[in-house]
Amino acid sequence: MEVATSLENLSEHPIAKAIVSYSNLKKFKEVKKFRIIRGKGIEGEINRKKIFIGNRTLMKENNISIKEIESKLIEFESKAYTTMIVSENKKPIGIIGVADDVKEDSISAINYLNKQGYKTVMITGDNELTAKVIAKRTGIKQVISQVLPEEKANKVKELQNRAMVCFVGDGINDAPALKQANVGIAMGTGTDIAIEAGDIVLARGNIRGVVASINLSKATFSKIKQNLFWAFAYNVIMIPLAVAGIIHPVLAEIAMAASSITVVTNANLLRRKRI
């Protein structure tokens, strides 16, 4: 654990911080030639030994065999753990499993979106098995796994070929995808760059806010259509009648004022809308 924690201490990734916090290590080993490999892991040298910490892809690219720990990896992945393999001089010496608790409100939010006819998709850098386990727990309909950070925006583009896309994210790597999506929703508890990239920011960082945003948007658009109807109804009917001399022009002026009052009153009713 000392080896892994010493390397992870040099990374700014949230998972790295969780590992360092969990280990509670007070003194770290000296790390040389530290490098972050985006979407795959990290590497460095400790006591002249080459250390890699990362996913299967990183191990494969560096010709590190993981056959002897394969069964344990599958066990971790089947429990929805994000797994990281620790290797020393091309030999696996450990596995780190990290998992987020699935919140009940997340499950209810996703189920609501599914029932409303939206297609829920998870885009993740996790391996396929872990991603599918999480998707099954939460009710997500489609999984796009093992996606590198720079590929997220491209995956959103592919989805846009079929439909409008709303992307929800909170990390630095989510920013391009948030910009690419038709609507980008950023968590207020996320990184500054993600918040800057989002069209909508959920202050509480709760996925139920996605449902509220959609419902509020629908209610707002409905009010816009209603207000346009009332504005045109008064004026289209009363002004021609006044021009034709059928009614007194004052009545047309009253109708115009009434249309403004109706529009403002109807818009204020939006406050009572439960979202």
Image (cartoon, rainbow, N blue to C red):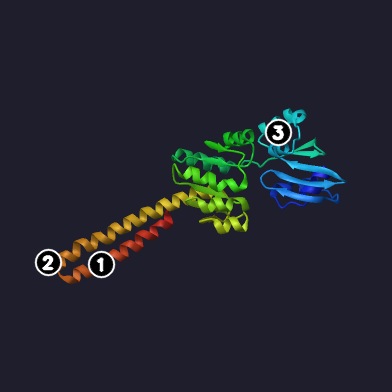
- Identify residue for label 3: 76
- Identify residue for label 2: 244
Give percent across and percent down for residue 100.
66, 42
Give percent across and percent down for residue 160.
46, 45
- Residue at 59% of width from left, 34% of height from top? 132
Q: CA distance from mark 1 to mark 2?
A: 17 Å
In front of the other: 220 or 173: 173
In front of the other: 248 or 122: 122
In front of the other: 211 or 2: 2
Q: Is residue 207 visible?
A: no
> Which structural element holds mark 2?
loop
- Identify residue for label 1: 256
Q: Is residue 95 above or below residue 205?
A: above
Q: Between tags 2 and 3, which lies in front?
A: 3
Q: Amino acid at mark 3?
A: Phe
Question: Image check: 144 left or right of 17?
Answer: left
Q: Amino acid at mark 2?
A: Ala
Q: Is residue 216 visible?
A: yes
Question: Image check: 249 left or right of 227?
Answer: left
Q: Do tag 2 and tag 3 residues touch (Cβ < 8 Å)?
A: no
